Image (cartoon, rainbow, N blue to C red):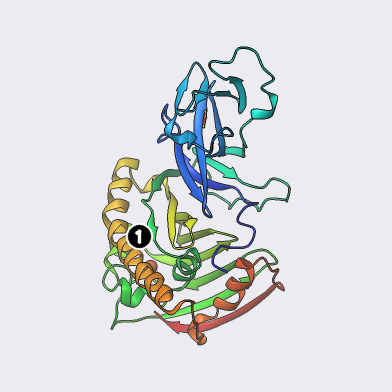
Amino acid sequence: MSYPSQLESCFIPLITLKSLKNKPIRRMIGGKPIVIWRQNNEIMAALDRCPHRNYPLSNGRIENNALVCPYHGWEFENGKCRNIPGIGKCDLSKFSLETLEVQIKWGAVFVRLDNSRPSFDFPQMPDDEEFDSFWWELKPSKARVFDALDNVLDPFHTNFIHDGFIRNKTKRQKVLQTIELSENKLAATYIQDADFGAMSRFLEGKRTKSIGHYYPPICFQGRWEGQKGLQHCVTIWFVPETENRMRSMVRFSMAKYRGPLWLKEILVRLFLFKVIEQDADALKELAKNIENFGAPHFKTSNADMLSAPFSKLYNGQKLEPKTIGPFEIYL
Ligand code: FES
Ligand SMILES: [Fe+2]
């Protein structure tokens, strides 16, 4: 399976409020086009097809609080058809849009396709009083969401793909890894000093531990702690647009005392831009090669302790709660 199970029942961030202007926009979830727009000071989302002849409504415009389809000018207000130009009075009640449930959270628009099933918990975010936060909306890239989550949960690739930035190919340190499985999520804790890469030196003080959380179906959260507690938190939603293309929404939170927000944004963009590019290149290679062979093929070593529980959660299964480890690894 390339889409995670339960993709349709979870809330997925598609755009920030800042980026959503007065024009409808299109986003994709699991192959389905979604249109998002603002009207009457409200944010709405629907399947991106006009009920009349399937025209993409994201090509339309907002006029007098209605989303107007460019093909024949049908007007939709709050998802209901309010006018069909050129035909006088008629019953419009059967021409409504296929609207979707929307939630605004942390300054972003979250949408879900299927509200007949319970949703997943949102991840826990650091407190706004003590943390500065900002979003980063990445461009779509060729990648399978399964591989993106597997990549971000896997510390061992950082010594190679991010050599010099996060960790080092040749110089490693002893790290204690503990895996905590809960019914519906997992976390891996790494107790270690700061990494040897440049990013740690510029962005972190002394590290006490880092934790990687997987919140099914598509969210990862990394937390980095120092002597004063939580320093940085990065939450990423890997949104599958199609089977081989994803668009990531990333929210950064950094402890306020560590300096002004603008400086943090610049530093994060400076370093993470490269790291994200390195991962994106690797994920593109994986996706292309899996396409060549027609299906993925995985062998799992002791370095991939998270693989089995991660795959289970991704496929909608529950885990037996337990703690595994600590193990000594070298990163
Ligand atoms: S297709 Fe939209 S108005 Fe006809
Ligand atoms: Fe990476």
Decide: few, some or many residues near mark 1? Use Cα within 10 Å; few <14, some 14-19, many ≥20: some
Q: Residue 105: which quarter of the image?
A: top right
Residue 106 seen by the camera: no
**What residue sits 54% from the left and 59% below the top?**
218
**What residue sits 57% from the left and 43% below the top?**
111
Q: Nearer the viewer, residue 99 or 261?
A: 99
Q: Quadrant of the N terminus?
A: bottom right
Q: Where residue 36 sits in the image (x, y, percent)?
A: 50, 36
Relative vertical location of residue 54 with respect to residue 194 in this rendering, above or below: above
Q: Secondary structure at mark 1?
A: loop
Give the tally of numbered discs. 1
Relative vertical location of residue 99 with respect to residue 177 in this rendering, above or below: above
Q: Nearer the viewer, residue 54 or 169?
A: 54
Lateral position of residue 150 relative to residue 119, left or right: left
- Farthest residue toward the top? 88
Lateral position of residue 98 relative to residue 38, left or right: right
**What residue sits 28% from the left and 74% below the top?**
163
Q: Where residue 71 sits in the image (x, y, percent)?
A: 46, 29
Q: Residue 166: which quarter of the image?
A: bottom left
Residue 276 seen by the camera: yes
Amino acid type at image mark 1: Glu
Q: Which residue is mark 1?
A: 204
Q: Nearer the viewer, residue 18 or 296?
A: 296
